[in-house]
């Protein structure tokens, strides 16, 4: 078997997209969603990991850019493997604990990012209706993990992996 030269081998390695977001909730466990200007469904504060940017920095950067909240993140809640769906390549999505927020703080958020039209606290069932189904499942897993104070949940396409 002939081995590839190292630089060719490195170029042949698969690439995965990554995204990171935050679960921000109030004392009654309503979750904070943002309404993006560029897509039909709502989302959690977060976004795509840039080149050479680890997911925890992405989550904190995106939360600060989208909401004006810049404070340390809490623990990792979810790692989700998202398979290739024919439109988007396979990837990994991370959700970190973004902390608690009050209704008053939500009303005073600095939404200076033109990508974000609004932000709203919603019960998980209402939030699940506004986001993509995969994110709804991932968001439920993140909320369950945060409520239990357990270690993070591993998911596949939003479904917790039990094996």
Image (spheres, grey):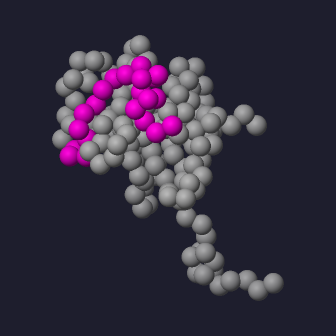
x%, y% of residue 119? 28, 31
At a point 23% along the width and 18% down the height, the residue shown is 104
x%, y% of residue 58? 40, 48
At a point 25% along the width and 33% down the height, the residue shown is 118
At a point 47% along the width and 22% down the height, the residue shown is 125
Residue 139 is a magenta residue: no
| Horizontal side of residue 7 vs 96, given as left or right | right
Q: Residue furthest right?
A: 1
Q: Quadrant of residue 123?
A: top left
x%, y% of residue 13? 61, 70
Q: Residue furthest top?
A: 28
| Horizontal side of residue 99 vs 110, given as left or right | right
Q: Is residue 77 visible?
A: no
x%, y% of residue 157? 59, 43
Query: Does 40 appear above or below 14?
Result: above
Residue 116 is a magenta residue: yes
Q: Is residue 50 visible?
A: yes
Point out the stretch of residues depicted in magenta: 113-133
At a point 36% along the width and 28% down the height, the residue shown is 32
Disc tally is 0
Q: Which residue is nearer to you in this view: 43 or 143?
A: 43
Please identify the quadrant where the N terminus is shown.
Answer: bottom right
Query: Does 38 appear above or below 143?
Result: below
Q: Which residue is nearer to you in this view: 93 or 96?
A: 93
Query: Does 135 appear above or below 14?
Result: above
Please identify the quadrant where the C terminus is shown.
Answer: top right
Q: Which residue is nearer to you in this view: 57 or 123?
A: 123
| Horizontal side of residue 117 vs 124, given as left or right | left
């Amino acid at each position: 078997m002939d081995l590839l030269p190292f630089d060719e081998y490195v170029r042949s390695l698969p690439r995965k997209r990554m995204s990171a977001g935050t679960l921000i909730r109030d004392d009654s466990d309503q979750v904070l969603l943002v309404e993006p200007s560029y897509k039909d469904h709502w989302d959690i504060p977060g976004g795509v990991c840039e080149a050479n940017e680890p997911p925890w920095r992405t989550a904190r950067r995106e939360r600060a850019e989208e909401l004006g909240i810049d404070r340390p993140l809490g623990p990792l809640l979810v790692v989700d493997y998202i398979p290739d769906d024919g439109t988007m390549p396979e990837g990994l999505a991370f959700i970190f604990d973004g902390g608690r927020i009050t209704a008053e703080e939500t009303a005073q958020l600095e939404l200076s990012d033109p990508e974000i039209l609004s932000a709203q606290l919603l019960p998980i069932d209402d939030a699940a209706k506004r986001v993509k189904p995969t994110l709804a499942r991932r968001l439920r897993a993140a909320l369950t993990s945060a409520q239990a104070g357990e270690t993070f949940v591993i998911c596949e396409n939003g479904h917790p992996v039990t094996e």
